[in-house]
Amino acid sequence: MMIALVLVEEREPRWQDDAACLGATSLFYSTSTPDILAAKQICMELCPVLEECREEAAATETSANAVFGVRAGMSARERKRLVKQPRRGGRT
Ligand code: SF4
């Protein structure tokens, strides 16, 4: 008889655990326009953590680092445009 041992690491839950894009990497990193639109629709209509995702994107993506894929309901091109614009009053 074979016994399988499974180790489960306990950790604090993270907002990413609820992301609607989990498991949809190929769709979110596709370069096809229909895929990009479908990924953006998932973000905007189905994702319960859109705000958290948007805050993290704004905090971590800069014009100096490359951005790829759909994130927070925006294509990479849209996010790059946001990064290049100066923020008014220090708020986003
Ligand atoms: S907003 Fe979009 S990219 Fe962000 S976690 Fe949700 S589904 Fe994923």
Image (cartoon, rainbow, N blue to C red):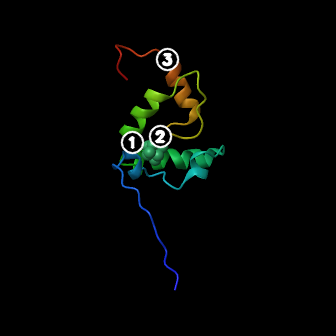
Marks 2 and 1, the one that precedes in the sequence = 1
Q: Earlier in the sequence, mark 3 or mark 2?
A: 2
Residue at image position (42%, 50%) is 19
The residue to which callout 1 is attached is 50
Q: Earlier in the sequence, mark 3 or mark 1?
A: 1
Compared across the picture, whether 68 is left or right of 15 comes to right
Q: Position of residue 72 (x, y in %)?
A: 46, 39
Circle 2/circle 1 CB separation < 8 Å: yes
Question: What residue is disc 2 on?
Answer: 73
User: Which circle marks residue 35 in the picture?
Assistant: none
Q: Residues within 10 Å of mark 2 (few under 14, many from 20)?
A: many
Q: Is the CB of the residue bearing disc 2 within 8 angstroms of ligand 1?
A: yes
3D distance between C-alphas at marks 3 and 2: 18 Å
Q: How many marks?
A: 3
- Position of residue 4 relative to residue 24, above or below, is below
Q: In 3D space, how far apart are the residues under numbered discs 2 and 1 (Cα atoms)? A: 8 Å
| Near-viewer residue (66 or 86) | 66
Amino acid carrying label 3: it is Gln
Q: Residue at x 55, y 36 (%)?
A: 75
Residue type highlighted by circle 1 = Leu
List x then y, in percent, for residue 49.
37, 45
- For label 3, the residue is 85
Where does the image place residue 56, in percent across and percent down from the top left? 42, 33
Whether residue 43 is visible, yes or no, is no
**Quarter of the figure with residue 69:** top right
Is residue 83 depicted above or below 24 in this figure? Answer: above
Label 1 beta carbon less than 8 Å to ligand 1: yes
Residue 82 position in % (x across, y down): 49, 24
Q: Could you say whether the residue bearing mark 1 is in a helix, strand or loop?
A: helix
**Quarter of the C terminus within the rendering:** top left
* Residue appearing at x 36%, y 46% in the figure: 14
Is residue 87 shown above or below 16? above
